[in-house]
C-alpha cells in the first residue's frame, strides 16, 4: 500500500519531531489495525497541519497532502467509511446496556464486529450496493445479513438502531425515520454522520429531531475536515 510506505518514510524523517511523529504513527497504526480487521485503540489526532506550521517547515506540505488522502485510502482498501476506535466502542457498549441492537446499512460490519466482542446481541444488515461507490472491497469483519434497511426495521426485534455514514445520495435515511415515527418506536436511533455535510440526505437533516449524546462523542473526534458526530434521532 502506497500510503503505508509513505508514512514509514515520514516516520524516519520526523523521528525527532514528537508532535509530528505522533500523527504519522497514529495513521500508520490505524492502517495496520484495519489490515487485521481491528480498529485503533484511541481516536486519531487531527491529520493535518496549519498554514503556519507548514510555512515553518515546508517538508510538512507533502505530508499534509498525504494525510488528506487517508480517508479515501481506507475506503478504497478496506471498505471503511467511518473509523471507530476502542474507547468509543466501549462507551457505545455501555450505552447499549444489554439491549437488542440492529446495525442497518452496516457495510463490512466494523461496528457490529466490535460490539460482538463485548457479547452484545446485535444483528448487522446491508444490501452491499455500496460496492460500486469508491470501492469494490466487500470483506465483512463479521456476519452481515443481506437485507435492506427498511425491511430490517420492519421485521427484526430491536431496542437500539445504529446507522453510520448513510450516503447523501439517497433518502432511505428519511424513509427509515418516517417508518420509526409511524410505528411509534420507543428505543434509541443512533446516527453517526456530519449534519448538513458529507453524510445522509438533506431532507433527513432538515426534518430529524437531533440531540448530541455527550458520552458517545467524547472519544468520537474528527481526524479530517469531515465533522461527523453521534446523534440521537427522533
Image: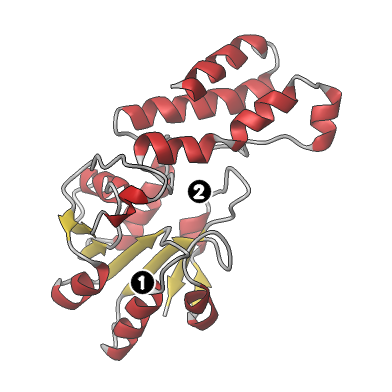
* The quarter of the displayed image where residue 166 is located: bottom left
Q: Does residue 76 appear anywhere in the picture?
A: yes
Quadrant where the N terminus is found in the figure: top left
Q: Is residue 205 left or right of residue 182?
A: right
User: Between disc 2 and disc 1, whose residue precedes?
Assistant: 1
What residue is rendered at 67% in x and 36% in y?
48
Q: Residue 210: x percent and y percent?
A: 50, 76
- The x and y percentages for residue 32 are 39, 25
Q: In this view, does 41 lie to the left or right of 66?
A: left
Q: In which quarter of the image is the C terminus?
A: bottom left
On the picture, is 138 further left or further right than 8? left
Q: How is the image coloured?
A: secondary structure
Q: How far apart are marks 2 and 1 (CA)?
A: 19 Å
**Comparing marks 2 and 1, which lies closer to the viewer?**
1
**Mark 2 packing: few (<14 Cα in 10 Å), some, or many (20+)?**
some
Q: Position of residue 220 (x, y in %)?
A: 50, 50
Q: Position of residue 118 (x, y in %)?
A: 23, 46
Label 1: few (<14), some (14–19) or many (≥20) C-alpha neighbours in 10 Å: some
Tell me, for residue 125, which label it has, or none: none
Q: Is residue 75 above or below residue 2?
A: below
Please name the residue that numbered disc 1 is placed on.
189
Secondary structure category for the residue under label 1: strand
Q: Mark 2 points at which residue?
A: 219
Identify the residue at image location x=58%, y=63%: 197
Question: Horizontally, is 165 left or right of 195 in the view?
Answer: left
What residue is rendered at 23% in x and 66% in y? 148
Can residue 43 be seen by looking at this rendering?
no
* Residue 96: quarter of image: bottom left
Residue at 51% of width from left, 24% of height from top? 3
Under tag 2, what secondary structure?
loop
Amino acid at each position: 500500500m502506497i500510503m503505508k510506505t509513505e508514512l514509514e518514510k515520514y516516520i524516519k524523517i520526523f523521528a525527532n519531531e514528537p508532535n509530528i511523529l505522533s500523527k504519522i504513527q497514529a495513521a500508520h497504526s490505524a492502517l495496520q489495525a484495519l489490515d487485521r480487521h481491528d480498529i485503533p485503540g484511541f481516536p486519531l489526532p487531527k491529520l493535518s497541519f496549519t498554514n503556519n506550521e507548514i510555512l515553518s517547515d515546508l517538508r510538512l506540505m507533502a505530508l499534509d497532502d498525504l494525510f488528506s488522502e487517508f480517508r479515501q485510502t481506507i475506503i478504497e482498501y478496506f471498505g471503511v467509511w467511518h473509523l471507530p476506535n476502542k474507547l468509543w466502542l466501549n462507551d457505545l457498549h455501555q450505552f447499549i446496556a444489554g439491549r437488542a441492537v440492529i446495525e442497518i446499512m452496516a457495510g463490512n460490519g466494523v461496528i457490529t464486529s466490535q460490539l460482538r466482542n463485548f457479547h452484545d446481541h446485535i444483528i448487522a444488515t446491508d444490501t452491499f450496493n455500496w460496492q460500486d461507490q469508491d470501492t469494490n472491497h466487500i470483506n465483512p469483519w463479521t456476519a452481515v445479513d443481506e437485507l435492506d434497511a427498511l425491511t430490517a426495521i420492519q421485521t427484526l426485534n430491536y431496542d437500539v438502531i445504529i446507522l453510520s455514514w448513510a450516503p447523501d445520495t439517497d433518502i432511505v435515511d428519511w424513509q427509515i425515520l418516517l417508518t420509526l415515527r409511524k410505528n411509534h418506536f420507543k428505543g434509541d436511533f443512533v446516527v453517526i454522520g456530519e449534519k448538513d455535510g458529507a453524510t445522509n440526505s438533506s431532507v433527513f437533516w432538515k426534518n430529524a429531531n437531533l440531540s448530541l449524546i455527550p458520552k458517545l462523542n467524547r472519544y468520537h473526534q474528527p481526524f479530517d475536515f469531515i465533522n461527523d458526530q453521534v446523534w440521537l434521532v427522533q
